Amino acid sequence: KITPDFKKDDAFDKIYIYEIDQHILKNEIDLAKSKANYIKSKYKREEVLDKILLIEINKLIEDNKLDDAYSEFGLVKEKSKTEIAAEAMYEQAEIIFKKGLLDSTLNVCSNLLNEIPGEYDYWIGKTYLLIADVFEAQMDYFQAKATLQSIIDNFAGSSEIVTAAKTKLDE
C-alpha cells in the first residue's frame, strides 16, 4: 500500500543515496560511511541498507581485505534483488581477477551475464570489459579485441562503457 509516508521515505532514500554516491565519487569514503551510518540508525529501507553495505565492503577492498570483501559481496548478492546485487556480482569477479584467477573470473562473469536482468546494462557492459581484460591477461588478444569491438558495435547502454572499450582497443 502506497501512503504519503512511503512517497516521502522514497524521496529521502534517493537523496541519501545520491549524497553517499557523491561522497564516494569525491573519494570521501569516511564522509560517505558517516552519512551511511547515520542513515542506517534511522531508516530500515532495503535499498539504502544495501548501499551502506557496499560502502562498507569497498572499505574492506581499500584495506586490501579482498577475501572478506568477496564474502560480503556474496551476502549482498544472495539477499538483494536490486541493481546492487548486479554490482556485487561484478565486484566479486573483479576481486577474483585481481587475484589472478582468470578461469574463475570468466565463470563468475558468465554467471553474472546469465543471472542479472537486462535492465542493468551498465553492469553487463562492465562485465564484458572485464572479460576482455581476462582474455588480454591470458594473451588471447584476438578474443580480447573481438570482445571490445563487439561492445563498441553493439552496446546501447552507457556511453562510458563504449568509451572504455574504445580506449582499451586503442592501447
Image (spheres, helix red, strand yellow):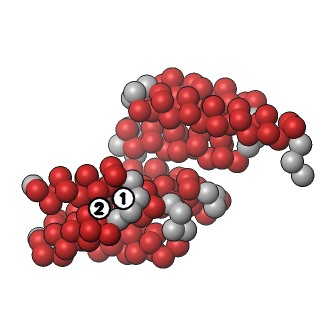
- Circle 1 crowding by C-alpha within 10 Å: few under 14, some 14–19, many from 20: many
The residue singled out by tag 2 in the image is: 129
Q: The disc labelled 1 sits on which kind of residue?
A: Lys
Residue at 32% in and 69% down: 154
Residue at 63% in and 61% down: 81
Q: Position of residue 97 (x, y in %)?
A: 30, 61
CA distance for labels 1 and 2: 5 Å
| Residue 85 versus residue 134 in the image, above or below | above
Q: Which mark is residue 126?
A: 1
- Looking at the rendered image, the quarter that the C terminus falls into is bottom left
| Residue 54 versus residue 154 in the image, above or below | above
Q: The disc labelled 2 sits on which kind of residue?
A: Leu
Residue at 29% in and 74% down: 103
Q: Are marks 1 and 2 in contact (CB under 8 Å)?
A: yes
- Circle 2 crowding by C-alpha within 10 Å: few under 14, some 14–19, many from 20: many
Residue at 61% in and 57% down: 82
Q: Which mark is residue 105?
A: none
- SS for tag 2? helix
Decide which of 35, 104 is in the foreground and name it. 35
Q: Position of residue 100 (x, y in %)?
A: 25, 62
Q: Position of residue 6 (x, y in %)?
A: 82, 41
Q: Position of residue 134 (x, y in %)?
A: 23, 67
Number of marks in picture: 2
- SS for tag 1? helix
| Residue 162 versus residue 41 in the image, above or below | below
Visible in this render: residue 145? Answer: yes
Image quadrant where residue 52 sits: top right
